[in-house]
Image (tube, rainbow, N blue to C red):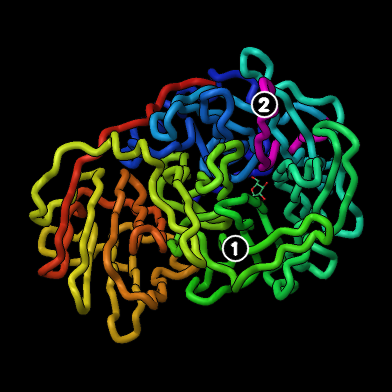
């Protein structure tokens, strides 16, 4: 793993020429994704500003241009008409003011008629590296360039730690007010969310109070990327709790959860119907956000980062890493969410290939699981050894995913085996494989499992329990490595 000095990580990008060689080198990697948004160069982490505005889906990602390192963060902009074919659109936000001198950190988008706004965290650090996070806004001009408001809409509170960031803006029609949720840590080092309110989008913001989630006062040490959406008459709250271990998550201390319940803006209380659920059970899924302005009361669109803070991935050797998940349609079914790839994803499905144990480099694999115990091993050698194993334990009604059989092992310290309780049993798995990721939609998407994988040349085979109905389809590419900065 390369060591980076602070100066190297926080270098400002003045001209695209400075990274054109890096782009050409990164684009050569055998692990470049074919239909997932990935960094134009260097590192991508959280999805940001995800929104449908005037016929276009806008998505940004946290971007460090220089390599696979969390350094000076920009927002990089990509656009799509269908959530599947994405175009690189260049830098979305750059850290070029006093308030964001050490990074334009995560945030959300807002569509107001003809106008589109980005709400983000300005990560200011002084010469002693003391951090002050500001909540800042930019408005897109006619050419789509983000023009920043000269001043933040508010700064941090001193009764919370320096960790106050990731504004999610919502308008609540019943209250005729705008609200911003901020991920935070209190002075006892507990994860919290803060709520600000205003009658107007760009001014008059005041602190309303702390979000109360009864029963979850002691749930991790920081809640990153809070986001809230209303689906089918319920409120769904998501965030990424950190600095705590949770059941079934091995040694990882970074997670992404959701709650279904009711948000009361008078009391600032989110009352969950039950406990928390994992948004995704995989090794690598974090900082997800719902798209704004989807316009369908029964559907939300979700996207996450295939990666975790503190983790390291094999493409660091090639000076790039990170990928967005597929954008997913999310619906409420009973007491849980059900996820599936965005509808237009089906356009990428190509020819069916024989289910003969060979795994195309990128593909969609639909499996109907027979009764009883079940095993699926992806990315095995031709003799069936090694690989990424998915085992259903019928007696315990749980799925055990074990990646220790892969040649390229990574993040061993946070655990390579995860268990998913499946009280209803296992009926089907849809596996979507891109060059360096696997996403599984299990039991019709009631459970999802997302991970990076870096198969080597002789790891393009699979083995599955006899009796399983397997249908494999090729997938067409839908992202390009265009150098747009
Ligand atoms: C989550 C996060 C956010 C922050 C951003 C910085 O991964 O730590 O809380 O805004 O990344 O890149």
Local SS, label 2? strand
Q: For this view, does 70 lie left or right of residue 334?
A: right
The Cα–Cα distance between marks 1 and 2, rounded to whole angstroms, is 28 Å
Tell me which corner region of the image, top left, top right, bottom left or bottom right, holds residue 212: bottom right
365 left or right of 187? left
The extreme bottom residue here reads 395
* Above-or-below relation of 484 to 355: above
Could you say which is closer to the camera, residue 52 or residue 187?
52
User: Magenta stretch: residue 256 in it?
Assistant: no
| Residue 279 pos. (x, y %) | 51, 60
Residue receiving disc 2: 116
Q: For the magenta stretch, what is the residue range?
A: 98-116
- Expressed as whole percent of the image width and height from the top left, the position of residue 134 reads 82, 41
Q: Nearer the viewer, residue 415 or 170?
A: 170
71 and 193: which is toward the camera: 193
State the residue at coordinates (8%, 49%): 354
The residue sitting at 78% across, 67% down in the picture is 189
Task: Give yes or no for contact between labels 1 and 2 (Cβ–Cβ under 8 Å).
Answer: no
Question: Split into 4 quadrants, where in the image is the C terminus?
Answer: top right
Circle 2 crowding by C-alpha within 10 Å: few under 14, some 14–19, many from 20 = many
Q: Earlier in the sequence, mark 1 or mark 2?
A: 2
Write down the residue under mark 1.
260
Left or right: where does residue 367 sit relative to residue 132?
left
Quarter holding residue 474: top left
Visible residue check, residue 479: yes
Q: Residue drawn at (79%, 55%), measured in percent from left and top?
A: 265
Residue drawn at (16%, 52%) of the image: 471
The image shows residue 291, relative to residue 23, as above or below, that is below
Image coordinates of residue 450 in percent, x first then y, are 41, 56
* Above or below: residue 104 compared with residue 468: above
- Label 1's element? strand
- Residue 101 at x, y percent in the picture: 77, 34
């Amino acid at each position: 793993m390369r060591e980076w000095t602070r100066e190297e990580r926080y270098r400002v990008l003045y001209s695209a020429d400075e990274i054109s060689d890096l782009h050409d080198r990164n684009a050569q990697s055998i692990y470049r994704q074919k239909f997932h948004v990935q960094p134009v160069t260097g590192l991508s982490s959280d999805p940001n500003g995800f929104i449908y505005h005037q016929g276009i889906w806008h998505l940004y990602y946290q971007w460090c241009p220089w390599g696979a390192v969390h350094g000076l963060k920009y927002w990089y902009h990509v656009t799509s008409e269908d959530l599947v074919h994405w175009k690189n659109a260049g830098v979305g936000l750059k850290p070029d003011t006093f308030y964001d001198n050490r990074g334009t950190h995560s945030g959300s988008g807002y569509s107001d008629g003809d106008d589109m706004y980005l709400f983000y965290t300005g990560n200011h650090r002084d010469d002693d590296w003391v951090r002050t996070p500001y909540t800042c806004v930019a408005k897109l001009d006619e050419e789509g360039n983000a023009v920043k408001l000269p001043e933040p809409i508010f700064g941090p509170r001193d009764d919370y730690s320096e960790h106050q960031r990731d504004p999610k803006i919502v308008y609540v029609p019943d209250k005729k007010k705008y609200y911003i949720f901020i991920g935070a840590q209190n002075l006892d080092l507990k994860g919290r969310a803060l709520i600000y309110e205003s009658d107007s989008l760009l001014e008059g913001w005041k602190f309303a109070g702390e979000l109360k989630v009864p029963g979850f006062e002691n749930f991790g040490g920081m809640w990153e990327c809070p986001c809230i959406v209303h689906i089918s008459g319920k409120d769904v709250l998501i965030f990424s709790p950190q600095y705590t271990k949770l059941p079934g998550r091995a040694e990882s201390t970074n997670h992404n959860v959701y709650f279904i319940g009711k948000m009361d803006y008078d009391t600032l209380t989110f009352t969950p119907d039950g406990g928390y659920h994992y948004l995704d059970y995989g090794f690598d899924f974090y900082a997800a956000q719902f798209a704004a302005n989807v316009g369908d009361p029964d559907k939300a669109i979700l996207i996450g980062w295939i990666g975790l803070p503190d983790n390291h991935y094999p493409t660091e050797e090639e000076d790039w890493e990170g990928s967005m998940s597929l954008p997913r349609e999310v619906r409420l079914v009973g007491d849980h969410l059900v996820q599936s790839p965005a509808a237009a994803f089906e356009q990428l499905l190509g020819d069916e290939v024989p289910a003969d144990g060979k795994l195309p480099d990128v593909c969609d694999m639909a499996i109907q699981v027979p009764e009883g115990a079940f095993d699926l091993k992806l990315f095995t050698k031709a003799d069936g050894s090694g690989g990424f194993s998915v085992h259903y334990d019928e007696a315990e009604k749980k799925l055990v995913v074990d990646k220790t059989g892969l040649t390229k092992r990574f993040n061993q310290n946070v655990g390579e085996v995860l268990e998913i309780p499946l009280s209803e049993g296992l009926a089907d798995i849809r596996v979507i494989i891109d060059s360096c990721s696997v996403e599984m939609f299990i039991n019709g998407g009631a459970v999802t499992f997302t991970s990076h994988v870096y198969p080597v040349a002789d790891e393009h085979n699979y083995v599955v329990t006899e009796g399983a109905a397997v249908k494999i389809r090729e997938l067409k590419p839908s992202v390009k490595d265009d150098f747009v900065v």
